[in-house]
Amino acid sequence: MEANIVIFGKNSIIAQNFINNNICKRINFINISRYSKNAKDINFDIGKFITQKDLSKIVLEIKKKLSHKKTIFILFSWCGGPRNTENLEKTSQINKNIIKNFINISELVVPSRIVFLSSAGALYPEEIKSYKFPETFTPSPKTFYGKQKYLAEKILVKHSQLKNQNLLILRISSAYGFDKRFSDQGVINKWLYSVANNKTLKLYNSIESQINFISFDQISKAIFISLEKELSGIYNIGSENSISLAEVIEEIKKISNKKIFLEKIHKSNRYFNIETKKFKSKTGLRFELNLRENIKNIYESINKVNQ
């Protein structure tokens, strides 16, 4: 694949992993970040209100760095997380700015495709144990985070229809993997850091709860193959099957060889099950959990950092 890929939000965990896992020398990455020490990157805070002058400046900077005919925009930038309950008004405004600025820039640069990283876990119901939710199910988010993600999806869909723009939305399941900058990215990471530092594991749901997990590396593969296959539309990105939190805890116990202490914050059941057949049928790619191997690698990496 020969293309310019403009990354909005270079410093996010998933964006960093995607960039670092690139194996195609014909990709020209143009990285946009609100803070970067790399002189080749474009420093720009997409979450702020910008003037027309600032907009023209950022568009000019992007165009100067284009080296291929095909250009793809990928939006990784986002404010707040699934459990965020503070400064909601501020968070909302930042995310509105992110979407508005992203659309305004895309109208002037005119990429061949735009990609938005959405959240499967925040959009589908979590009360039904045995049903896997497909992309055709109309989201019914209950959290502030979920409502914001769904609003962004709808805005981008409307924009793509009006401008006849190719849009790809990837609804990502619970992501996990090692990143030394962050110890709290997802429940598996939090628990592994807690065990490595002899702290209790905080349970926000019952151990019977089922969660669909996917590794950072698998997400990168999903993005790359989606671009290679020139996919458009909405796709669930996750493992073929969900797993109970009890099974995750048991694997952590075996790998760490430590006694696990649990702090139960909430006892509610959560059933996060998604259907991933659509993505598999289009790409031939399916994701197995490989939990033991991945947990072992993350735990060993954490211990190396702690030494």
Image (cartoon, grey):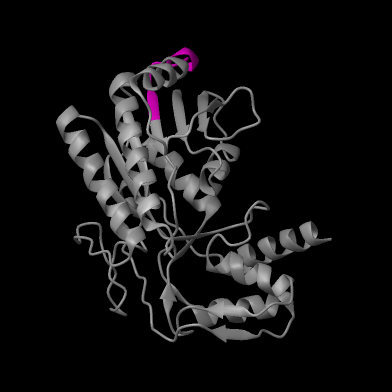
- Residue at left 71%, top 85%? 259
- Residue at left 22%, top 47%? 154
Q: Nearer the viewer, residue 4 or 26?
A: 4
User: In the image, is residue 68 part of the stretch drawn in magenta?
Assistant: yes
Residue segment shown in magenta: 63-72
Q: Position of residue 76 (x, y in %)?
A: 44, 42
Q: Is residue 116 visible?
A: yes
Q: Is residue 1 visible?
A: no
Q: Position of residue 151 (x, y in %)?
A: 25, 50
- Residue at left 67%, top 61%? 298
Q: Split into 4 quadrants, where in the image is the N terminus?
A: top left
Q: Is residue 38 above or below residue 248?
A: above
Q: Quadrant of residue 129?
A: bottom left
Q: Nearer the viewer, residue 105 or 20?
A: 105
Left or right relative to 133: residue 250: right
Q: Split into 4 quadrants, where in the image is the C terminus?
A: bottom right
Q: Nearer the viewer, residue 110 or 263?
A: 263
